Amino acid sequence: MIKIFKKLFDTEYKELKKFTAIANQIDSLWDEYDKLSDSKLAKKTDEFKERLANGETLDDILVEAYATIRVMAYRKLGEKAFLCQLIGAIAIHYGNIAEMKTGEGKTLTTIFPAYLNALTGAGVHVVTVNEYLTQRNAEWMGPIFNALGLTVGVNLRELNPKEKQEVYNADIMYTTNNELGFDYLRDNMVVKKEDRVQRKLNYCIIDEVDSVLIDEARTPLIISGGVMQNVNLFDRADMFAKSLSENTDYIKDEKARTISLTDEGAHKCEKVFSHNSALH
Protein backbone atom coordinates (compact mmCIF):
# COMPACT_ATOMS: atom_id res chain seq x y z
CA MET A 1 0.00 0.00 0.00
CA ILE A 2 2.82 2.39 0.91
CA LYS A 3 4.49 1.65 -2.43
CA ILE A 4 1.25 2.47 -4.27
CA PHE A 5 0.93 5.86 -2.55
CA LYS A 6 4.62 6.56 -3.07
CA LYS A 7 4.30 5.79 -6.77
CA LEU A 8 1.20 7.99 -7.01
CA PHE A 9 2.83 10.96 -5.30
CA ASP A 10 6.06 10.46 -7.25
CA THR A 11 4.09 10.61 -10.50
CA GLU A 12 2.32 13.80 -9.45
CA TYR A 13 5.62 15.35 -8.37
CA LYS A 14 7.21 14.49 -11.71
CA GLU A 15 4.25 16.00 -13.55
CA LEU A 16 4.43 19.17 -11.47
CA LYS A 17 8.16 19.39 -12.08
CA LYS A 18 7.57 18.96 -15.82
CA PHE A 19 4.84 21.62 -15.93
CA THR A 20 6.96 24.05 -13.90
CA ALA A 21 9.83 23.67 -16.36
CA ILE A 22 7.47 24.42 -19.29
CA ALA A 23 6.03 27.42 -17.42
CA ASN A 24 9.55 28.79 -16.95
CA GLN A 25 10.15 28.48 -20.71
CA ILE A 26 6.98 30.49 -21.35
CA ASP A 27 8.03 33.12 -18.84
CA SER A 28 11.46 33.44 -20.47
CA LEU A 29 9.79 34.58 -23.72
CA TRP A 30 8.04 37.56 -22.13
CA ASP A 31 10.56 40.24 -23.10
CA GLU A 32 10.84 38.95 -26.67
CA TYR A 33 7.09 38.75 -27.28
CA ASP A 34 6.31 41.98 -25.43
CA LYS A 35 8.33 43.84 -28.07
CA LEU A 36 5.98 42.62 -30.82
CA SER A 37 3.15 44.87 -31.98
CA ASP A 38 -0.49 43.76 -31.69
CA SER A 39 -0.61 42.97 -35.40
CA LYS A 40 2.52 40.83 -35.21
CA LEU A 41 1.13 38.98 -32.21
CA ALA A 42 -2.09 38.38 -34.14
CA LYS A 43 -0.10 36.95 -37.06
CA LYS A 44 1.25 34.34 -34.67
CA THR A 45 -2.15 32.62 -34.84
CA ASP A 46 -1.83 32.00 -38.58
CA GLU A 47 1.78 30.93 -38.06
CA PHE A 48 0.74 28.36 -35.46
CA LYS A 49 -2.07 27.04 -37.67
CA GLU A 50 0.34 26.64 -40.56
CA ARG A 51 2.80 24.77 -38.39
CA LEU A 52 0.05 22.41 -37.25
CA ALA A 53 -0.95 21.85 -40.87
CA ASN A 54 2.67 20.96 -41.64
CA GLY A 55 2.78 18.19 -39.08
CA GLU A 56 3.67 19.81 -35.77
CA THR A 57 1.59 19.02 -32.69
CA LEU A 58 -0.06 21.23 -30.09
CA ASP A 59 2.66 20.22 -27.64
CA ASP A 60 5.28 21.50 -30.10
CA ILE A 61 3.79 25.00 -30.17
CA LEU A 62 2.49 25.18 -26.59
CA VAL A 63 5.28 27.36 -25.18
CA GLU A 64 5.08 29.94 -27.96
CA ALA A 65 1.27 29.95 -28.07
CA TYR A 66 1.03 30.49 -24.32
CA ALA A 67 3.64 33.25 -24.49
CA THR A 68 1.60 34.94 -27.24
CA ILE A 69 -1.73 35.01 -25.46
CA ARG A 70 -0.06 35.93 -22.16
CA VAL A 71 1.21 39.17 -23.68
CA MET A 72 -2.10 39.92 -25.44
CA ALA A 73 -4.03 39.30 -22.21
CA TYR A 74 -1.81 41.78 -20.41
CA ARG A 75 -2.42 44.41 -23.10
CA LYS A 76 -6.20 43.91 -23.10
CA LEU A 77 -6.80 43.37 -19.38
CA GLY A 78 -3.70 44.70 -17.67
CA GLU A 79 -3.22 41.29 -16.03
CA LYS A 80 -0.01 39.32 -16.42
CA ALA A 81 -0.50 35.64 -15.71
CA PHE A 82 1.60 34.40 -12.80
CA LEU A 83 3.71 31.25 -12.83
CA CYS A 84 1.04 29.32 -10.88
CA GLN A 85 -1.55 30.25 -13.51
CA LEU A 86 0.74 29.09 -16.29
CA ILE A 87 1.29 25.78 -14.49
CA GLY A 88 -2.48 25.38 -14.08
CA ALA A 89 -3.02 26.19 -17.76
CA ILE A 90 -0.47 23.56 -18.78
CA ALA A 91 -2.06 20.97 -16.48
CA ILE A 92 -5.49 21.63 -18.02
CA HIS A 93 -4.16 21.21 -21.55
CA TYR A 94 -2.83 17.77 -20.62
CA GLY A 95 -6.25 16.70 -19.32
CA ASN A 96 -5.71 17.26 -15.61
CA ILE A 97 -7.84 18.98 -12.98
CA ALA A 98 -6.14 22.15 -11.77
CA GLU A 99 -7.30 23.10 -8.28
CA MET A 100 -7.11 26.85 -7.76
CA LYS A 101 -8.40 28.91 -4.86
CA THR A 102 -10.81 31.80 -5.27
CA GLY A 103 -8.87 34.86 -6.36
CA GLU A 104 -6.05 32.96 -8.04
CA GLY A 105 -7.38 33.81 -11.50
CA LYS A 106 -9.12 30.69 -12.81
CA THR A 107 -10.83 32.55 -15.65
CA LEU A 108 -7.55 33.96 -16.95
CA THR A 109 -5.94 30.53 -16.62
CA THR A 110 -8.49 28.92 -18.95
CA ILE A 111 -7.71 31.19 -21.91
CA PHE A 112 -4.33 29.52 -22.44
CA PRO A 113 -5.52 25.96 -23.20
CA ALA A 114 -8.60 27.42 -24.95
CA TYR A 115 -6.43 29.42 -27.35
CA LEU A 116 -3.98 26.58 -27.96
CA ASN A 117 -6.62 23.96 -28.72
CA ALA A 118 -8.71 26.37 -30.82
CA LEU A 119 -5.78 26.61 -33.25
CA THR A 120 -6.79 23.23 -34.70
CA GLY A 121 -10.02 24.79 -36.01
CA ALA A 122 -12.07 21.98 -34.49
CA GLY A 123 -13.61 24.11 -31.74
CA VAL A 124 -13.30 24.53 -27.98
CA HIS A 125 -16.09 24.56 -25.38
CA VAL A 126 -15.63 26.45 -22.11
CA VAL A 127 -18.30 25.17 -19.73
CA THR A 128 -19.57 27.09 -16.70
CA VAL A 129 -22.37 26.44 -14.20
CA ASN A 130 -24.68 29.35 -15.03
CA GLU A 131 -25.46 31.84 -17.79
CA TYR A 132 -24.21 34.82 -15.80
CA LEU A 133 -20.69 33.38 -15.68
CA THR A 134 -20.98 32.26 -19.30
CA GLN A 135 -21.75 35.76 -20.55
CA ARG A 136 -19.38 37.48 -18.15
CA ASN A 137 -16.40 35.30 -19.04
CA ALA A 138 -17.08 35.55 -22.77
CA GLU A 139 -17.33 39.34 -22.62
CA TRP A 140 -14.28 39.54 -20.37
CA MET A 141 -11.97 37.21 -22.28
CA GLY A 142 -13.48 37.60 -25.75
CA PRO A 143 -11.43 40.70 -26.73
CA ILE A 144 -8.22 38.74 -26.15
CA PHE A 145 -9.25 35.95 -28.51
CA ASN A 146 -10.64 38.41 -31.07
CA ALA A 147 -7.36 40.36 -31.06
CA LEU A 148 -5.58 37.11 -31.97
CA GLY A 149 -7.97 36.37 -34.84
CA LEU A 150 -10.25 33.83 -33.17
CA THR A 151 -14.05 33.96 -32.96
CA VAL A 152 -15.99 33.64 -29.70
CA GLY A 153 -19.59 32.48 -29.25
CA VAL A 154 -21.97 32.46 -26.27
CA ASN A 155 -24.52 29.64 -26.10
CA LEU A 156 -27.73 30.94 -24.50
CA ARG A 157 -31.15 29.35 -24.02
CA GLU A 158 -33.04 31.94 -26.09
CA LEU A 159 -31.04 31.33 -29.29
CA ASN A 160 -32.84 29.73 -32.22
CA PRO A 161 -31.28 26.71 -34.01
CA LYS A 162 -29.63 28.81 -36.73
CA GLU A 163 -28.06 31.12 -34.13
CA LYS A 164 -26.89 28.12 -32.14
CA GLN A 165 -25.22 26.65 -35.23
CA GLU A 166 -23.24 29.88 -35.63
CA VAL A 167 -22.27 29.82 -31.96
CA TYR A 168 -21.13 26.20 -32.10
CA ASN A 169 -19.05 26.93 -35.19
CA ALA A 170 -17.09 29.65 -33.37
CA ASP A 171 -13.48 28.87 -32.49
CA ILE A 172 -14.29 29.14 -28.77
CA MET A 173 -17.77 28.77 -27.32
CA TYR A 174 -18.82 29.64 -23.78
CA THR A 175 -21.78 27.63 -22.52
CA THR A 176 -23.46 26.21 -19.44
CA ASN A 177 -23.34 22.47 -18.84
CA ASN A 178 -27.15 22.24 -18.92
CA GLU A 179 -27.50 24.02 -22.27
CA LEU A 180 -24.79 21.82 -23.76
CA GLY A 181 -26.68 18.75 -22.58
CA PHE A 182 -30.06 19.94 -23.83
CA ASP A 183 -28.59 20.83 -27.23
CA TYR A 184 -27.30 17.27 -27.46
CA LEU A 185 -30.74 15.88 -26.62
CA ARG A 186 -32.48 18.19 -29.11
CA ASP A 187 -29.99 17.22 -31.82
CA ASN A 188 -31.03 13.59 -31.35
CA MET A 189 -34.68 14.53 -31.93
CA VAL A 190 -34.34 16.38 -35.24
CA VAL A 191 -35.51 14.80 -38.47
CA LYS A 192 -32.87 16.31 -40.76
CA LYS A 193 -29.14 16.11 -40.10
CA GLU A 194 -28.63 19.73 -41.19
CA ASP A 195 -30.93 20.89 -38.37
CA ARG A 196 -28.44 19.78 -35.71
CA VAL A 197 -26.62 22.60 -33.94
CA GLN A 198 -23.62 20.77 -32.49
CA ARG A 199 -20.60 19.84 -34.55
CA LYS A 200 -18.14 17.04 -33.77
CA LEU A 201 -16.84 17.43 -30.23
CA ASN A 202 -13.16 18.32 -29.88
CA TYR A 203 -11.93 19.90 -26.64
CA CYS A 204 -13.68 21.05 -23.49
CA ILE A 205 -12.62 23.05 -20.43
CA ILE A 206 -14.89 22.78 -17.39
CA ASP A 207 -14.98 25.55 -14.81
CA GLU A 208 -16.05 24.41 -11.31
CA VAL A 209 -15.48 20.81 -12.38
CA ASP A 210 -16.63 19.37 -9.04
CA SER A 211 -19.97 21.16 -9.33
CA VAL A 212 -20.54 20.22 -12.99
CA LEU A 213 -19.39 16.59 -12.91
CA ILE A 214 -20.58 15.67 -9.40
CA ASP A 215 -23.27 17.97 -8.01
CA GLU A 216 -24.99 18.96 -11.27
CA ALA A 217 -24.59 15.47 -12.71
CA ARG A 218 -27.08 14.17 -10.13
CA THR A 219 -29.87 16.14 -11.77
CA PRO A 220 -31.14 14.40 -14.91
CA LEU A 221 -31.82 16.40 -18.06
CA ILE A 222 -35.39 15.74 -19.17
CA ILE A 223 -36.70 16.94 -22.49
CA SER A 224 -40.00 16.39 -24.27
CA GLY A 225 -40.88 16.62 -27.93
CA GLY A 226 -42.26 19.80 -29.41
CA VAL A 227 -45.98 20.47 -29.73
CA MET A 228 -47.34 18.25 -32.45
CA GLN A 229 -49.30 20.06 -35.12
CA ASN A 230 -51.57 17.07 -35.83
CA VAL A 231 -52.52 15.92 -32.34
CA ASN A 232 -56.23 16.16 -33.26
CA LEU A 233 -55.84 14.45 -36.63
CA PHE A 234 -57.40 11.19 -35.42
CA ASP A 235 -60.49 12.96 -34.06
CA ARG A 236 -60.85 14.96 -37.28
CA ALA A 237 -60.51 11.81 -39.39
CA ASP A 238 -63.10 10.05 -37.24
CA MET A 239 -65.60 12.89 -37.64
CA PHE A 240 -64.98 13.08 -41.38
CA ALA A 241 -65.46 9.33 -41.88
CA LYS A 242 -68.78 9.43 -40.03
CA SER A 243 -70.00 12.24 -42.31
CA LEU A 244 -69.55 10.21 -45.50
CA SER A 245 -72.40 8.47 -47.30
CA GLU A 246 -72.09 4.94 -48.68
CA ASN A 247 -72.21 4.65 -52.48
CA THR A 248 -71.96 8.44 -52.79
CA ASP A 249 -68.68 9.14 -51.00
CA TYR A 250 -67.34 5.61 -50.69
CA ILE A 251 -67.92 2.10 -51.97
CA LYS A 252 -67.77 -0.94 -49.70
CA ASP A 253 -66.65 -4.31 -51.08
CA GLU A 254 -68.05 -6.92 -48.69
CA LYS A 255 -66.21 -9.81 -50.30
CA ALA A 256 -62.79 -8.17 -50.30
CA ARG A 257 -63.60 -6.42 -47.02
CA THR A 258 -62.31 -3.10 -48.33
CA ILE A 259 -63.60 0.45 -48.63
CA SER A 260 -62.54 2.95 -51.30
CA LEU A 261 -63.43 6.60 -51.76
CA THR A 262 -65.34 7.72 -54.81
CA ASP A 263 -64.17 10.79 -56.71
CA GLU A 264 -66.72 12.86 -54.81
CA GLY A 265 -65.54 11.45 -51.48
CA ALA A 266 -61.91 12.12 -52.43
CA HIS A 267 -62.70 15.75 -53.26
CA LYS A 268 -64.45 16.16 -49.91
CA CYS A 269 -61.41 14.72 -48.18
CA GLU A 270 -59.08 17.10 -50.02
CA LYS A 271 -61.22 20.04 -49.00
CA VAL A 272 -61.46 19.07 -45.32
CA PHE A 273 -57.78 18.25 -44.88
CA SER A 274 -56.45 20.96 -47.24
CA HIS A 275 -54.73 18.42 -49.47
CA ASN A 276 -54.17 19.46 -53.08
CA SER A 277 -53.38 16.13 -54.68
CA ALA A 278 -55.74 13.43 -55.85
CA LEU A 279 -56.45 10.59 -53.44
CA HIS A 280 -56.59 7.01 -54.64
Image (cartoon, rainbow, N blue to C red):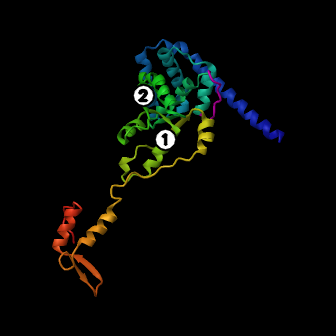
The stretch in magenta equals: 94-103
Three-letter amino acid code at the position of disc 2:
Leu
Magenta region, mostly helix, strand or loop?
loop
Look at label 1 and name its amino acid.
Answer: Leu
Residue furthest out toward the right = 2
Q: Residue at x 42, y 52 (%)?
A: 225
**Residue 22 visible to an observer of this rendering:** no
Q: How far is disc 2 from disc 1 in space, using C-alphas? A: 21 Å
Q: Position of residue 196 (x, y in %)?
A: 40, 46
Mark 1 falls on what kind of element? helix
**Quick check: 208 above or below 218?**
above
Along the line of sight, the residue nearer the viewer: 126 or 67: 126
Residue 44 left/right relative to 66: left
Mark before the other along the chain sequence, 2 or 1: 2
Q: Is residue 98 magenta?
A: yes
Per the rendering, the mark at residue 143 is none
| Whether residue 29 is visible | yes
Q: Nearer the viewer, residue 4 or 255?
A: 255
Q: Where is mark 2, residue-wise? A: 150
Quarter holding the N terminus? top right
Residue with the mark numbered 1: 180
At x 44%, y 32%, the residue is 154
